[in-house]
Image (spheres, rainbow, N blue to C red):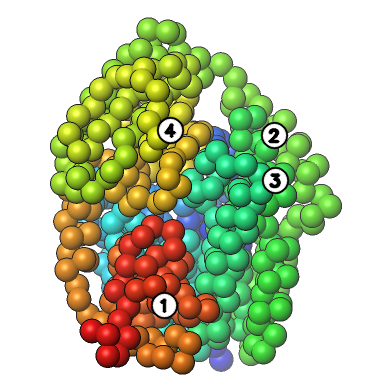
Amino acid sequence: MPLAVKITYLGHAGFCVEDDRSVIVMDPWLSPEGAFDSAWFQFPPNGHMAEFVADRLADSSRERFVYVSHEHHDHFDLGFLERLTSRDFTLVIPHFRRATLLEQLAGYRCRRLAALTDRERIPFGGGWLRLYLDDSSPNRDSALLVRMGDKTFFNMNDCKLFDRIDEVREDAGTLDVFACQFSGATWHPTCYQYEGTRYAAISKQKSFAKFESVARAIERLEPATYVPSAGPPCFLDPELYHLNFEASNIFSRFEKLEFYLKRRLRKTNVELANLGPGGTIDVAGDRAAVVAGPTVAESEHAGLVESYAKSRRELFNGHRTLSPSAVEETLARLRLEFAKKLASLSLANRVDVPLYFALREREDVAVKVDFHSRTTTLTQERRPEEFYELVAPAWQVRRVLEGALTWEEFSLTFRVRIRRNPDIYQPVIHAFLLMDADDLAQWCAALEALEARQERIAVTCDGREYSVLRYCPHQGGDLAQGWMEGNHLVCPRHHWRFDITRGGTCTSTGASIEAIAPGLE
């Protein structure tokens, strides 16, 4: 008889999958200080699951694994991993081109450290696990497929593998449980200085695009059960607290997803399992037995957030004020950091607006990056008609300059205000801001290699067939796995929309997939 498989939700993107012979713990984010300099916190609170995980990993009668999907601290909780006293387990991580995880875990003591390449598999008693990597710079992320006995669980967390769903389905066969992110986590529009109506419209469009990606993944994977995971976090910093209560933003909660999926997936038999930390799915027969655990109803949300914030109040006292001289020093160091980045940015001439980065304590002075002249200066000049501007607290920028955070982790703190004119996404500026200097040269080379790929596919728009470039110019998403919405071909990874009737031009960036109708070549 097949062994029973139990999946326990740890909170956020964390799971424990186990049977009588094996235990796999995935992305245990359990530290009480949150992540990204205490910008994000687990919601609902899940500190009580730390003992549960420690007990499972101390069970010497079973083979044990801990999987860390990528280096973001809401998945890679090194503090919790270091507090574990029993480490007779295999630590499974993805083998990315940049070995950030390997470097941070170089001295970590455990039974074995296994860095897996894309689609590499580890067998264990009665099953196996397989990783899928997204190493499409600047993204570094992974997903995990587990088979225990005759049961399968695919945990995509927030890895955007939507253009590889068919590949996963082929590897998995019948899929019992599928989990993936459904809520946003980006600067745009969270940190942009939009008026309320514009902010809400962008948030709604982005939320529904993510919901649609989830729906399409469910349709193609055909799991018996779908578990929403990896968000949204809770914001307890007084500076960010308002994000918990905005009527419309990208941090969608389960109720909105549930409403969308129940209408969108009326013809499927998938069960939506909204789990709280400690909730379980027993996969023993044809259908799973779900115990939801402590979920949070909408009516309880505000009260729980308020009490949660009070319990973490001490984290936000006394470490954020820099002296005037330290602010000046931070500005000078920021200029040098941007000069270093600029030296690695071979595609700088593609940026046609200046970048201004000011500190909140001295908004009258900014580091100006002129991409065409490849210069960085301190300036008090007024902003020209076209510009890109960021304002952030000096203490937070200083944390990056001291190596306590990467630039990408800084972006996830959301402690920044952004304005741009024109309001157009520019990939080179985005890469310049979010990537470390060591990564920029590789990113430029990867983008040029992507642009050199000329493979084309056919799509049908308004009853007419068009030829378009197959790979999205953003990060190489496979448009053969995209879908049409009206006249627009949508990229399955990041939802870039290309207007086929206008030459395949992206509606938000001006990039093109060169749509050509027969007879118009």
Packing grade of label 3 (10 A; few <14, some 14-19, many >=20) is few
Q: Is residue 140 above or below residue 516?
A: above
Q: Which mark is residue 400?
A: none
Which comes sooner in the sequence, label 2 or label 1?
2
Discs 3/4, front: 4
Which residue is label 2 attached to? 309
Among the two numbered marks 1 and 3 on one chain, the one whose residue lies closer to the N terminus: 3
Residue 234: image quadrant is top right
Instruction: Decide which of 40, 215 is in the foreground and name it.
Output: 215
Q: Are marks 4 and 1 in contact (CB under 8 Å)?
A: no
Q: Earlier in the sequence, mark 4 or mark 1?
A: 4
Gap in angstroms between the C-alphas marked 1 and 3: 36 Å
Q: Distance from label 2 to label 1 (Cα)?
A: 50 Å
Q: Is residue 17 left or right of residue 286?
A: left
Expressed as whole percent of the image width and height from the top left, the position of residue 241 reads: 66, 36
Mark nearer the viewer, 4 or 1: 1
- SS state under label 4: strand
Q: Nearer the viewer, residue 410 or 113?
A: 410
User: Disc 1 or disc 3, which is closer to the eye?
Assistant: 1
Do the CB atoms of the residues marked 2 and 3 lie less than 8 Å apart? no
Q: Which residue is mark 4?
A: 390
> Percent from the top left, x then y, of residue 264?
66, 79
Quadrant occupied by the N terminus: bottom right
Q: CA distance from mark 2 to mark 3?
A: 17 Å
Which residue is drawn at the image coordinates 40% and 51% (left, top)? 425
User: Which of 306 and 249 lies nearest the eye of the viewer?
Assistant: 249
Please give the residue where the numbered disc 3 appears in the rendered image.
Answer: 246
- Amino acid at dot 1: Thr
**Cα–Cα gap, marks 2 and 4:** 27 Å
Q: Give me the C-alpha separation between circle 3 and circle 4.
A: 22 Å
**Pair 2/1: label in front:** 1
According to the picture, the residue beneath numbered tag 1 turns out to be 501
